Each structure stands twice: as structure tokens, then as C-alpha cells.
Amino acid sequence: MNWLNGKRQTTNAFLLYSCAPWKVATGIAVSISLVTATSAWSQPVPGSLDAHWNEGASDCKATPQAPLQVHAYEPQTFILRQSPCASFEANFLYLLIGSDKALLIDTGAIADPKEMPLAKTILELLPDKDHKKLPLLVAHTHRHLDHRAGDPQFASLPSVQIVPIDLEGVRAFYGFTDWPNGIAHLDLGGRTVDVIPTPGHNATHVAFYDNRTTILFSGDFLMPGRLLIDDAAAYRESALTGCRLSEDASAYPYPGGHIELNAAGHPYRFGSHYHPNEHRLELAREDLAALPAAFESFNGFYARHPNYILTNPIRNLIALAIIAVAVLIFIVWGVRRLLRRRRRQHG
Ligand SMILES: [Zn+2]
Ligand SMILES: [Zn+2]
């Protein structure tokens, strides 16, 4: 099934019950746009997410481990996980192979090929076509460094194209004329990948929907971890858009850029190289469906949900700074008061 054809039409909020229950509850009838799905339907190619991802170690020096784990979801879809020991970000990268072209989603947190042999690994996974490696497109969910640090490893390779990282470059490359509206399509040959703008965590964020597997590669927009909010209004809109789209198509599952929670939903300490008992990688449609309402009730600082945490790091820093200044003022005031009282007693 081709999920999206880029056309928009209006529909009524009642249809969107699971995306925005708060709208139905208040009885407000609103019209929103919805991208229509095409009627052509075919069975998704099945695959396996049954993998034990490298969990790093409490002492990485004492327990050396492979920097990159490769898991074949199915013969033409690979999931790569950077070891938490190699980088605490422990990014997940995805390689999608079509008959004419391959797509790499993100290049991870490490530039040095000696530390992280990413390009070498990807080239080994790429099949040959006409006695040459299949052409490769290197794309990013967004421009944060942990999703593109490996780009230079691909820069000088033949038949490799790298999508620019700045917003202007992203828009131009995919041909978006009304960002963040619209959907772009990548034709890999017998396999179409839709590029869906999802700004909010970062202004350049996009998600990728693969029509072969019906997987939505959601990056840092939706993952079992801290959903860091840069622009809350944009994020909420992206959540609504993503939710509507997922209702309109058989999108499943939703693997993201990181795992930052354990199986019980508790976050690992920020910067930890050890992830014992990790949460599963993929989130479900229900998690995406709950996201708009999560934004609706968000206090602007921090909110725990079963499979993700909403947090605004800049706001939290500002709040901490205000608290620190207030505490300092209180201490200075207290000390001055004490000195004054002593002076009075001695005088
Ligand atoms: Zn990010
Ligand atoms: Zn990230």
C-alpha cells in the first residue's frame, strides 16, 4: 500500500477519536486536513524485531565490544545499533534496499571510521548491480550531530549522495514547497519511502514511512526515551499529523533513533553507557495516538508517559537557573541579616 499521495482533504474530528480524544470530549467540531491514502493495497513484507540489542556495560574498558550491531529485519531491511559503549547516544540507523537504490537513515554519533566502521559495514551490506555497488542515498531524520556525525565516511564514496542537513537544503532536496505540509516520495525501485516533515524536536526533523514493510522510522520524534521539545507548537502539530496519517494506513511498527528507557519505563541516567534491560525499540500506534493528548496536558517542563517522557530541556535549565539565583539571593539576604543582628548585639 502506498500510504500517502500528497493530496489533502478535510475531514471531521469525530473520525480522529484515537488521535485527539480531548477534541471529541469537548464536543468541538473542527475541520482538519488529512492526507488521503491510495486504494492500492498489498501485504507488507514481514520481518523480525526479535533482537537483543547491545546494552553496553558499566565498565566498557573491561568489557570490549563490537561498535556496531547489525540486525536483518528482513533481507532488504537492516537495523544497525551503535554500541552504548562507543557512544552513550547508542543510535539506531536503518538501511533500506530497493532494486535501484538503497537508503541509509542517519549516520550516528561517531565520525572516526576506526572507532565506528559504518561506511565499510554499509558497503558490505549493499548488493551489487551491474557489477557495481547499488547507489546509496544517505538521509537524516534531523540535523542533530548524533544523527549525522558519520556522514564524512561516505563523502568520497562513488554513487553515494548525502542529503543536506540544513532546513533549506532539506526542503530543496525533497522538493517541499509548503514545509512542513506535504509529503515527499523516494523511489528506491520497487520500494517507495515517504518523507514526512515532523518538526518540533528539531526544525529539520522528518520521519520515513516505508511501503515495503509499513514501518514508520520515527527518529527522535517518537521513541522510548526523552522526547526533547524545541518547539512545542510545531511538535504538537507533527504529533497530530503523524497520528492522522497512521490512522489512515497500516503503519506498524515505529522504531526510533534511541532507547533511553528500561523495560519498566524508567530513564537511564543521561550519558550512561550501560542500558540493562532495555525497553523494546519499537513503539506502537497507540503511543503515537496518545502523543497529541500528551502535549495538550503538558506542563511545559516534564511529563512521564508509559513509553516516553516529554521534556523541554531549555525551559528546565532556565527554571533551574531561576531557582539557583533565588536560593543565592536568599542566602545573601540571610547572611546580611545575621551580620546586622550580630553587629547590633555587639554594639
Ligand atoms: Zn535529536
Ligand atoms: Zn538523537
Image: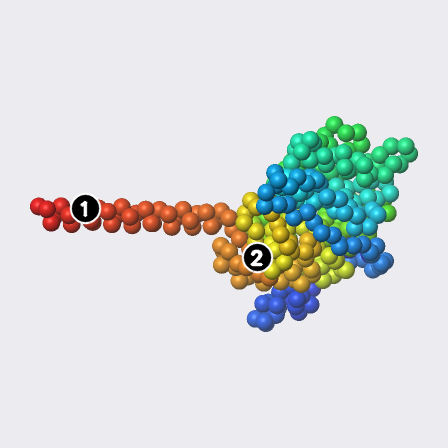
- The residue under label 1 is 339
Q: Percent from the top left, x then y, of residue 88?
A: 60, 43
Please give left or right for residue 209 compared with residue 21 in the image. Answer: right
- The residue under label 2 is 266
Q: Quadrant of residue 282?
A: bottom right
- Of label 1 and label 2, which has the lower sequence position? 2
Q: Percent from the top left, x then y, of residue 135?
A: 82, 36
Element marked by disc 1: helix
* Residue type highlighted by circle 2: His
Q: Residue at x 75, y 44 (%)?
A: 70
Q: Percent from the top left, x then y, of residue 77?
A: 79, 47
Give the CA distance from mark 1 to mark 2.
46 Å
Asked whether residue 142 is in view, the answer is no
Please give left or right for residue 26 compared with residue 244 in the image. Answer: left
Tell which residue pokes out farthest to the front in this image. Answer: 62
Residue 180, numbered circle: none
Please give left or right for residue 110 compared with residue 99 in the image. Answer: left
Asked whether residue 97 is in view, the answer is yes
